[in-house]
Image: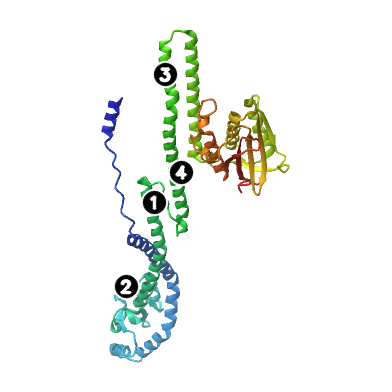
């Protein structure tokens, strides 16, 4: 068995954890997000500009035609006052008086869109695709008057550095880029800080430091994630602590019954007397029952300590519920007198509790009292402010003051109760404490008016989950 395990592990090879990544790069995160936002913004702006330009192009061309109609008619009248042979000199002279270029070309040299060519041949003003050059056919001649480019930025004679609209666009986009960079930085920096804090926490948890917790997040987007991470860490820490505690305690508790069984087997092999063999068989059966009870109690404690389930709270009539629990365990009391006193409770008092887990607490306390009580057990309840307090009293040997807190720890038993008949396994009261913690309450031990021990369960009347 050992050889096979060794071979199996040698095939798998030694475990070497993957190296940790370096810390998140703030600059990389900023630039990636900034380029994404800025690129999206520019793409949307360009698309919107294209759509708007396409939509208003017809309106702009119509406005330009009406705006320049009078000027072109005056130029045409001025040209027709002179012979056609003088038109080049006349147009050159007029060109000196305007801020845009004037020239005369033959109709066949122009390549216009079909719609604009039709307008030109019909004697109307035609405009190029950029909306900056106007064409007008000089009455019935094959010559066309070309006016423009009208905009000084597109006129080579007046070109000075960058065009005005380009300079305005560059300035506008620069301001937008700077403002957007500031906004992105103000958003990215807290996000990076929270990411780095959670990375450090996750790294510490990966290295086995289960007490590490993520700090409070400055970004609301990572708040639930940090709470989930902390809850996971707390649960893992509790689970590992419980497993270590159980492993250590169970290994200790198992030694005694196993040693007795081994001793009984040795005696059984050497004895031929039927009565002695029968006695040894009964001893081994008792030890096996003890082992079974120990395992069952350990599993129950491990389940309560590990799962921490969401409470399925139900509003119950506490008097009737306590009566049901007492009646369910009264058959085990034999000759003991088990009483329930609910006189201190208001009538029809409803208390919220989990019907699956709270019975474990009451039953364990009642069974514990049955082990030590001499003749009487009393269960009572009272309301204290916004809490319900349930007391289980017995007239047994009681619990010393110095032991009253320690007794709720798992596998803790008083020295005078270490025999199998009454000692148990030291897990019953630990399970009681876990159940009460799930109900946001607590269990405590004290001195009973009957002379023995008093165990008290206290938890809120309402958990703000259900409506009574």
Gap in angstroms between the C-alphas marked 2 and 3: 116 Å
Residue positioned 31% across, 75% down in the render? 110
Front residue of 35/100: it is: 35
Between marks 2 and 3 in the image, the one whose residue lies nearer the viewer: 3
> In this figure, which residue is indicated by the disc labeled 4?
235
Q: Could you say which disc has been placed on residue 201 in the image? A: 1
Q: How many residues crowd mark 3 within 10 Å: few (<14), some (14–19), many (20+)?
A: few
Asked if the residue at tag 4 contacts the one at tag 2, i.e. Cβ–Cβ closer than 8 Å, the answer is no
Q: Earlier in the sequence, mark 2 or mark 1?
A: 2
**Residue 154 x/y as whole percent:** 32, 79
Give the distance between the C-alpha atoms of the residues marked 2 and 4, in whole angstroms.
80 Å
Which of label 2 and label 1 is nearer to you?
1
413 is higher (above) or lower (below) than 47: above
Q: Nearer the viewer, residue 61 or 285?
A: 285
How crowded pointer 1 is (Cα within 10 Å; few <14, some 14-19, many 20+) is rated as many
> Which is nearer the eye, 151 or 109?
151
Q: Which mark is residue 111?
A: 2
Position of residue 166 in the picture relative to residue 449 (left or right): left
Disc 4 is placed on an element classified as helix
- Residue marked by disc 3: 263
The reply to whether callout 1 and callout 4 are in contact (CB within 8 Å) is: no
| Mark toward the start of the polypeptide (1 vs 4) | 1
The residue positioned 31% from the left and 83% from the top of the image is: 104
The percent position of residue 334, horizontal first and vertical second, equals: 64, 24
In the displayed structure, would residue 225 be above or below residue 382? below
């Amino acid at each position: 068995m050992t050889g096979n395990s060794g071979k199996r592990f040698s095939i798998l090879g030694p475990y070497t954890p993957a190296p940790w990544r370096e810390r998140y790069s703030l600059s990389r995160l900023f630039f990636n997000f900034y380029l994404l936002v800025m690129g999206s913004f520019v793409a949307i702006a360009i698309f919107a500009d294209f759509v708007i330009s396409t939509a208003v192009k017809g309106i702009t061309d119509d406005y330009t035609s009406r705006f320049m109609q009078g000027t072109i008619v005056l130029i045409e009248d001025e040209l027709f006052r002179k012979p056609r042979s003088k038109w080049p000199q006349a147009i050159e002279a007029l060109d000196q008086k305007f801020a845009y270029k004037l020239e005369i070309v033959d109709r066949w040299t122009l390549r216009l869109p079909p719609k604009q060519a039709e307008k030109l041949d019909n004697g109307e003003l035609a405009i190029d695709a950029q909306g900056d050059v106007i064409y007008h056919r000089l009455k019935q001649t094959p010559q066309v008057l070309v006016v423009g480019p009208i905009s000084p930025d597109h006129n080579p004679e007046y070109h000075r550095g960058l065009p005005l609209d380009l300079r305005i666009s560059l300035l506008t986009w620069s301001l937008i880029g700077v403002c957007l960079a500031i906004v992105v930085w103000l958003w990215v920096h807290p996000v990076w800080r929270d990411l780095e804090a959670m990375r450090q926490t996750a790294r510490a948890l990966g290295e086995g430091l289960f007490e590490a917790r993520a700090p409070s997040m400055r970004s609301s987007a990572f708040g639930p994630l940090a709470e989930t991470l902390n809850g996971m860490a707390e649960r893992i820490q509790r689970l590992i602590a419980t497993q270590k505690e159980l492993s250590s305690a169970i290994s200790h508790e198992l030694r005694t019954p196993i040693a007795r069984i081994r001793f009984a087997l040795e005696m059984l092999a050497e004895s031929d007397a039927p009565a002695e063999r029968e006695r040894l068989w009964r001893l081994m059966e008792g030890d096996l029952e003890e082992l079974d009870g120990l395992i069952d109690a350990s599993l129950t404690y491990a389940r309560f300590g590990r799962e921490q389930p969401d409470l399925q709270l139900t509003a119950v009539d506490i008097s009737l519920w306590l009566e049901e629990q007492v009646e369910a365990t009264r058959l085990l009391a034999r000759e003991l007198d088990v009483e329930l006193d609910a006189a201190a409770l208001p009538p029809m008092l409803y208390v919220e509790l989990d019907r699956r887990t709270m019975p474990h607490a009451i039953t364990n306390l009642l069974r514990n009292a049955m082990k030590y009580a001499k003749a009487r057990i009393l269960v009572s309840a009272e309301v204290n402010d916004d809490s319900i307090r349930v007391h289980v009293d017995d007239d047994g040997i009681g619990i010393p003051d110095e032991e009253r807190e320690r007794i709720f720890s798992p596998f803790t038993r008083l020295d005078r109760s270490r025999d199998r008949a009454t000692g148990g396994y030291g897990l019953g009261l630990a399970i009681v404490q876990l159940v009460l913690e799930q109900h946001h309450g607590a269990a405590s031990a004290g001195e009973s008016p009957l002379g023995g021990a008093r165990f008290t369960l206290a938890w809120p009347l309402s958990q703000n989950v259900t409506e009574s």
